[in-house]
Amino acid sequence: MGKHLAPKKKHELNFIKRIPKRVIGPEQAAHVLREETDEVPKTGAHAVREQPDAAPVRAAHVGREKNRQKPEKAAGPKLRMPTMRMPTLGRHPWIFYVLAVILLIVIRFLPLEGWKIPAAYAIPALLCLPEHVLNAWERFRRGDRLNGSLIACLAAVLLFLTGMYPEAVLLLILTFAISFAEKLLLDRSNAEHNTLSQILPGAVQLVTEEGTERVDPAAVQPGDIILIPAGERIPLDGVVFEGITTIDTATVSGQRSPWAVNVGYKVYAGCRNLTSDIKVRVSRPFEQSTANKILRVSESAPGFVSEQESFAQRFSRIYTPAVLGLALVVGVIIPAFRGGWIVHAQRAAVLLIASYCVPELFCIPLLYGRALSKTEKMGVFTKGKDCLEAMAKADTLIFDKTGTITEGRYSVTDVYPVKMSEKQLLAIAAAAECFSRHPIAFAIREASGRLDERALRSVRLREIPGRGVSSLVGNRQVLVGNAALLEEHGVKYNIPSRPGTAIHVSVDGRYCGHILVADKVRRRAFDALETLRVNGVKKLVLLTGDVLSVARPIASRLNFDMLRAELRPSEKAKAVGYLMKNKGSRTSIAFVGEGENSGRLLTDADVGIAMGSLGSDQAFACADMMIMDRDIFKIPKTLVISRTAYRAAWENFAAGAGVNVLLVLLGALGVVTPLAAEIVSFVVCAAMLGNTLRLK
Ligand code: ADP
Ligand code: MG
């Protein structure tokens, strides 16, 4: 149990003033007035809108965007990896290299003499060279002037001219082998991504007066009715209009979780309709459908460069020209004065071999690409490689209690009316809460049963985050919320006799009683938090708007290090800001919230993780990582994946850069032969590629 379990008084925390970003909630009904009680600017750089159709996926990061790095050449929308696809000689360029290997072995054992030796080695060399030249030219044309293929060609030519024929051929073979293996790994990642793109619909069966008509999904408008046959994927987001069926979210959430849906239930594009045909009233155009949003996130993610990647880029940008310059000095300038052209040309070839790394940027983009694919397979969608890197560095995790640690599914446990029946109290509260999307509102509506639809038309809802609602029902003002809400409105209330989350109700300033609601701690919350600790998370913080008497037992049971209860959203934002201000320079802070209710807070930490993101516009607009379902164990799993990628990236960089620098030093002194340099370089590159397989 941590030291700061009791909430600190406000003055004890030297909060910095952060202007939180504003999130405009999705699907705000015209009659729903959401009172933002915090001082939030309504326009300017902090205005964050619900993700519009064509806006970049990262609209929510307006304030943080300046710290992020995009690749120099942004990856095209359909390009999964930032690596360029190279033209090849035919479909199977490796055939040339296999032939070259066979020839190399045969020639070695042939009793050749004089001019016949270079002539014989020229055959495998000429088999290998075209692919390299094509590659080098393509990269050169695309702006990668000092590319590995070009340098390998130069080194091979230099070796051949100085009489090291087998070494020249071997160099071409080994560099090809590494690039080919890298390409195979990239293709595998791309193939995984292509399975994800299957969640996009082909054609949609639009219900018309004459029957059904197959149309393009983009042509379907909100309000249209579509038919979804059993066994097919749901093409667009909507609400079930006719039929009962079971749907499975496995394609988007990564886990088989069939659930039954009936008329009035929401269904999301990308999920599969399992058992029977249903008709759905479309609620969003194709562009804003869940499947389209997921795909856009997934496609733009590899385009964001991690810090490690940009570090490796900077290193290569200095290192390669520097070593090439040194090669020029060793190979041309020194022998011009001292002679010994052949020896010096061979030393220069060693420097050329040591001046580049065959896999792109020490495999760092590949590592993060694989980490992204791996998390996506679990149904965790990340907005960029840099977010995974920030997750890897997280040493503090802040949880917004409801919907993360707890299930976020409240139920009414007791009703304490004052001068009215239990049923009446529930009916009043349910009417006032009828448009609220808070889990407590769902519980109260459920307990109250069906509401009179005509009466509901007169309800005007004003939500007060962290407090409750203040609604006009007809011409009466109904307050439903916690004690602080009633205090703020000057309404006297009864202190609940039993512990729990008490929701007080008043009508026109007259106290009507309270309703006790309870939420359950997630089954695997304890194990998930312990796994986080085992994997290096040092501080777990619980923030909640709920009362201390409810939050304290949860925090102590789950070993949280710090708890702050009875907070409004603005106070939660200050708490996150305080922790952000006081964090270590090499660490980061992750905030875990519920997609629908944590909105703006998700943008304040280094990494905002939204749980239950399926169908939540706020999650897609504000979070950096979206967990589609509510499996809390996906947080430690994502942490482990990102840490593995992060560590492997440093290992690769250290091994690749270290060995190359060593080769440069020894090569310049003439200690290393070209053959040794080739083999060492090959082994290191192969080890780097092997390291990426840790993220299987
Ligand atoms: P948490 O921090 O656990 O996510 P919230 O900030 O969403 O909680 O809410 C804090 C408290 O505010 C709740 O425990 C409840 O007492 C009250 N509250 C918020 N919204 C509502 C609502 N719609 N109806 C009733 N009470 C509410
Ligand atoms: Mg909440």
Image: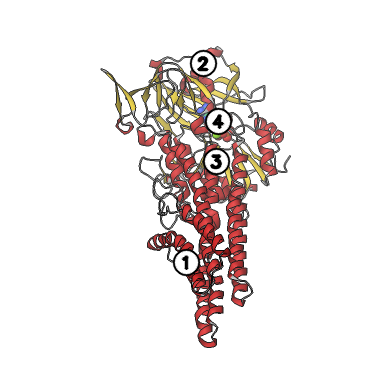
Q: How would you rate the neighbour count of disc 1 (Cα within 10 Å): few for under 14, some for 14-19, many for 20 or more?
A: some
Q: CA distance from mark 1 to mark 4?
A: 56 Å
Residue 526, given in percent of the width and then of the height, sits at: 68, 34
Q: How would you rate the neighbour count of disc 2 (Cα within 10 Å): few for under 14, some for 14-19, many for 20 or more?
A: many
Q: Three-letter amino acid code at disc 4?
A: Gln
Which of the image's four quarters has the N terminus? top right
- Secondary structure under badge 1? helix
- Secondary structure under badge 2? helix
Front residue of this view, candidates 464 and 324:
324
Q: Given this view, does label 2 or label 1 mark the residue nearer the observer?
A: 1
Q: How would you rate the neighbour count of disc 4 (Cα within 10 Å): few for under 14, some for 14-19, many for 20 or more?
A: some
Q: CA distance from mark 2 to mark 1?
A: 87 Å
Asked whether disc 3 touches disc 2, contact meaning CB atoms under 8 Å apart, the reply is no
Q: Which mark is residue 565?
A: none
Q: Which mark is residue 448?
A: 2
Q: Given this view, does label 1 or label 4 mark the residue nearer the observer?
A: 1
Which of the image's four quarters has the C terminus? top right
Which of disc 4 and disc 3 is earlier in sequence?
4
Q: CA distance from mark 3 to mark 4?
A: 12 Å
Above or below, 604 against 332 in this view is above
- Determine the residue positioned at 53% across, 21% down: 444
Q: Three-letter amino acid code at disc 1?
A: Ala
Q: CA distance from mark 3 to mark 2?
A: 40 Å
Q: Which residue is mark 3?
A: 375
The answer to whether any part of residue 596 appears in the image is: no
Q: Which residue is mark 1?
A: 122
